[in-house]
Image (tube, rainbow, N blue to C red):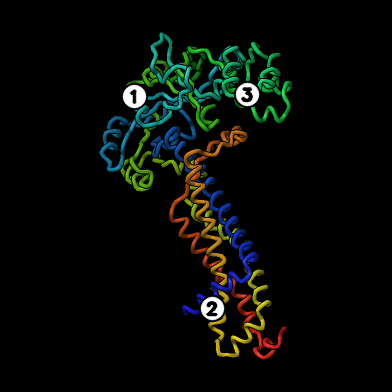
Amino acid sequence: MKMIFEIAWKNVWRNKTRSLVVICSVAVGVFAGVFLLAAINSSVIQRIDSAVNEELSHIQINTRDFRSSGDIREIIPGSQEMITAIKNVPGVKYVTARIILNGIASSAARSTGVEINGIDVEAEKEMFTLPGKLIPGTGSYFGSRTRLNSLFIGEKMAKELDIIRFILTPEAISSLERQNIPPSIIAKLKPVTGQRFTTEKKFIRAYNELLSSSESSAYGLQIREAAWSYRQGSRIILSFLDFNGNQTGAAFRICGVFRTNNDMFEMRSVFVPADELRTLTGMDSGMFNRIIIRIDDNRNTGRITKTIKSMFPALEVLSWKQIQPDLAMLADFMQQIYAMFMILILSALSFGIVNTMLMAVLERTRELGMLMSIGMNRRKIFSMIMLESVFLSVVGGFTGMAVSELVIAVTAKTGINLVKYSEGMEAFGYSAHLYPSIEPQFFIITALLIILTGILSSIYPARKALRLNPVEAIRTE
């Protein structure tokens, strides 16, 4: 068998140009597939992390009718005793409760519907990463004292209510110069310098009239970031129904503005200290609409959800996968998606290997006839051709995996900036800055698929060789 291996390896390099072309095509195909899947994987992982760490946590408990009705009177009975019991469940890290109600946020210019979250500020600071998403220069995470009620809102909502505006001040122009924006671009922006634009759309429309489409595409984000303007301590009015069903409301001072990768979350959610919201709604101490649970390992979410559900069968206990089933589907089926994608790529590449091996068999008809005539049996002929196909696919495939592993390692540190597509991606909650990553077992699956591709690609050429008549093959010129 060793001799068959040696002959097959030498045969691969008899026509170096042809073999290198096939190996390079396999390497490029495998690299493209692995790297693309790593980028998709990172996007899904980042979205799940954002959902868990900023929006949902791992497990939520509501009354059975709360999510459908949104009624503030859907109170969890005995919430304080429940929190104490849940803290003793193995694997649970943090537990807190929220008051949740729907309302309307209004500024002097506009109004929009919101979900108002009454929170335990200190507890949620430990549970969520949202406080770290505060935009510098917009205040703090409930850190400043004010005679009005405090409010923490998203950037998208601040833009919608015209609280964030855009103005190219001298400081903004200096910022653009420090970012090495060409002087010709800055000169074109002079007509709008000093003008205040109440919305981002108006500002974009204004500078688009001054710049070419390519210039707007290249420098638009930097121009908008430089012109971004916010006055600390801005106020809005929140209107909502209190615990008795009466329309009420109050003025809130914005203590800070956060920025995430989810426009829908930024647009919909506002946060208020629970004590302030309880005073406004007339709710008694200890009344909450939702209990939120953080666990120490996301892999244990299903098990701990079942445990807590058995403790409180009268309530609705949901994991993040049940709250956002689209993310759950992606998380649960990523391995299958990987395999299907790589099978499609390798199936396409196998046609190149089949073509190469057919050409090799036709060119070596005389040689194969002589090998058969001196006693090499059909099994060895088949093995030799199969090994040649496997060598082509393995050398190309492993080269592609090595290159992809190197590129993934580099881009995992530097990231891939898809800022041009940020508006569309963030509308669905996905980050426009990707850090490719993929699990090690994926490379094992890919290696097996590459070997299988080589074996399957050899079947037709090998059968072609086995059909040769040794006497007729020797006479072939």
Q: Which residue is mark 3?
A: 181
Q: Which residue is mark 1?
A: 122
Mark 3 touches mark 2? (CB < 8 Å):
no
Q: Nearer the viewer, mark 2 or mark 1?
A: 2
Where's residue 319, x and y in %?
41, 42
- Label 2 packing within 10 angstroms: few (<14), some (14-19), many (20+): some
> Label 2 is placed on what type of residue?
Ser
- Where is residue 349, by image quadrant? bottom right
Q: Which element carries disc 3, helix, strand or loop?
A: loop
**225 or 40, nearer to the observer:** 225
The reply to whether residue 277 is in sight is yes
3D distance between C-alphas at marks 2 and 1: 69 Å
The reply to whether residue 352 is in sight is no
3D distance between C-alphas at marks 1 and 3: 42 Å
Q: Which residue is mark 2?
A: 383
Where 66 sits versus 141, above or below?
A: below
Q: Quadrant of the C terminus?
A: bottom right
**420 or 371, nearer to the observer:** 371
